[in-house]
DNA sequence: TTAATATTGTTAAAAAAATAACATAACCTA
DNA sequence: TAGGTTATGTTATTTTTTTAACAATATTAA
């Protein structure tokens, strides 16, 4: 696809949801302004880094006050495109798919969940959080009649690539993938792998590191080959 | 807490789950070896970076063949501590908590889910995927009698800090947090925020960037202040 | 057995990211 | 209005990360 000229560095993108979350929380405090130093305490990033990140997008702060919380929150919303309305569907109404149907995070980010699809006849026509589950055989027809921006994929791994191919053929441009299989998509499709178990991996690694440091031992990392 | 001497750089840690996932998938292929070039195709990281990452831990490759898939997978398992057994509980048996009870990713990473807690009387004693939901009032007693390594937090945001304080007081050292509120924990507690909606944020931002690039317009990023 | 090929592990160079430093400006107090 | 304080935005510096290059070595084919 090739990076766009004014592409925001990935490393900054990865911090934006963190700023978003804390600014959202600060809304409900009585404070009106927040300094880069306070944001540093909250986020764990250095105040210098925070000022640098924000200055990438513009000049939002006020000398000797800090940043207007409401105002900065609005800016971050605009930068992330949350002010644009986007339609979402979920494919796979199993345990995770159903949980996502109750996710409260859509509206504030500009998303609207408009349908859920499954292939299990027992689930079809079931209503989950006001959304009716429909047969995945309707998928193509539905996509023809409805402008859908993002499809969340919560089918079993074995079905993931086939569904993906159908979604792409039907014109979907962005996929939010929860299956733990690597998907192949054309270059112009946005694919976000949502690795739910990533936190568990990191916790295991950190606990392991701590154990190794306490024991003072080193793992035997050899595998029989010279 | 302070970094340990032989702390693995965060940037490498963040790529380990990706290597893990692809090597796991490669297990079920007929191939025995994989080259850094092939891994680059799969992961999107450069082959040079992959060789560098792996060489941080040891010498696993075989010249002119590449890496023994099974063997490298085992190494990554050891590095991530998946060979150590860990016990997991879930607090909050709502939509997300119940979905996590069906997560198939625990065993392969060395985790065993041993209990689920909720405060809703209607849920207590319900059996989800062979695990009985118990009252959160039993939490302290349970933790006294069972060595629990990680607690997954899937209660509403408003309850999150209180439950966290109870968990910490009861001796839990690692928390896998799904609530979208910033938690305060002592420095020696490992806290992993699992931002489920992160993918949605990134997709929104990317679609927004694409739109801006196509329009050629720039957002008005000002907020009334000079 | 020799030459051609493949692919690692490592070193050197380049690029990106983070930190530190500070000039500047706004605010506050007296 | 002067002097002290606060906190930004930006520049300079340092550190980290990535890429590129390649020597070393195992494998394969001739
Ligand atoms: N449950 C979790 O906590 C969890 C965690 C991490 C990853 N995941 C991944 O998310 C996916 C779903 O997990 P789950 O626990 O909800 O599984 P699940 O089995 O409960 O749900 C899968 C659903 O997909 C439906 N389905 C199957 N094939 C389909 C098709 N071709 N078209 C439409 N629907 C189809 C099934 O009928 C079922 O309802 C899996 O890939 C899993 O690896 C789940
Ligand atoms: N559902 C999603 O897709 C999703 C996505 C992102 C984040 N989250 C977050 O995960 C959390 C749970 O979401 P959910 O959709 O499962 O909500 P939910 O309301 O379905 O479940 C919450 C559960 O926690 C229980 N609970 C409340 N207070 C408790 C306490 N003090 N002790 C023990 N249990 C308690 C409730 O009885 C309920 O069963 C929320 O913080 C939410 O923001 C959910």
Image (spheres, coloured by chain):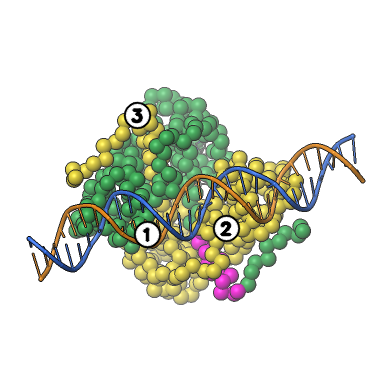
Chain colours: A yellow, B green, C blue, D orange
Residue B46, numbered circle: 1
Between discs 3 and 2, the one toward the N terminus: 2
In reply to whether residue A6 is colored magenta, the answer given is no
- Along the line of sight, which residue is nearer the eye, B74 or A77? B74
Left or right for A206, reference A5 = left
- Along the line of sight, which residue is nearer the eye, A14 or A101? A14
Q: Is residue A105 visible to us here?
A: no
Could you tell me which quadrant the C terminus of chain B lies in?
A: bottom right
* Residue at horizontal 56 percent and vertical 42 percent from the top: A44
Residue D28, image quadrant: bottom left
- Dot 1 alpha-carbon crowd within 10 angstroms: few under 14, some 14 to 19, many 20 or more: some
Look at the numbered discs 2 and 1 and tell me whether their residues touch, using CB distance below 8 Å. no
As displayed, is residue B124 above or below residue B222?
A: above
Residue C21, image quadrant: top right
Residue A109, numbered circle: 2
Look at the numbered discs 3 and 2 and tell me whether their residues touch, using CB distance below 8 Å. no
* Residue at horizontal 60 percent and vertical 61 percent from the top: A79
For marks 2 and 1, give the CA distance: 33 Å
* Residue at horizontal 42 percent and vertical 27 percent from the top: B143
As displayed, is residue B169 above or below residue B114?
A: above
In reply to whether residue B210 is colored magenta, the answer given is yes
Magenta-colored span: B201-216
Left or right for A163, reference A223 = right
Residue A216, numbered circle: 3
Q: Magenta-highlighted stretch: main secondary structure? A: helix
Q: Nearer the viewer, mark 3 or mark 2?
A: 3
For marks 1 and 3, give the CA distance: 33 Å
Look at the numbered discs 1 and 3 and tell me whether their residues touch, using CB distance below 8 Å. no
For marks 3 and 2, give the CA distance: 47 Å
Residue A190, image quadrant: bottom left
On whether ligand 2 comes within 8 Å of the CB at mark 2, the answer is no
Q: Tell me the subunit letter for badge 1.
A: B
């Amino acid at each position: 696809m090739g990076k766009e000229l004014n592409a925001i560095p990935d490393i900054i993108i990865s911090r934006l949801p963190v700023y978003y979350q804390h600014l959202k929380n600060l809304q409900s405090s009585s404070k009106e302004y927040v300094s880069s130093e306070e944001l540093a305490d909250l986020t764990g990033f250095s105040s210098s880094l925070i000022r640098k990140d924000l200055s990438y997008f513009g000049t939002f702060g006020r000398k000797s006050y800090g940043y207007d919380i409401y105002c900065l929150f609005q800016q971050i919303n605009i930068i992330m495109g949350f002010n644009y309305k986007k339609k979402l569907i979920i494919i796979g109404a199993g345990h995770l798919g159903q949980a996502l149907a109750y996710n409260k995070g859509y509206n504030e980010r500009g998303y609207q969940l408009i349908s859920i699809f499954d292939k299990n006849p027992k689930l079809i026509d079931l209503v989950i959080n006001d959304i009716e589950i429909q047969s995945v055989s309707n998928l193509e027809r539905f996509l023809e009649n409805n402008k859908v921006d993002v499809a969340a994929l919560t089918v079993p791994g074995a079905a993931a690539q086939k569904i993906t191919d159908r979604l792409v053929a039907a014109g979907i441009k962005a996929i939010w993938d929860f299956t733990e299989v690597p998907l192949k998509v054309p270059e112009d499709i946005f694919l976000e792998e949502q690795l739910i178990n990533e936190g568990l991996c990191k916790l295991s690694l950190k606990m392991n590191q701590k154990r190794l440091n306490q024991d003072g031992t080193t793992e035997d990392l050899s595998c029989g080959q010279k």
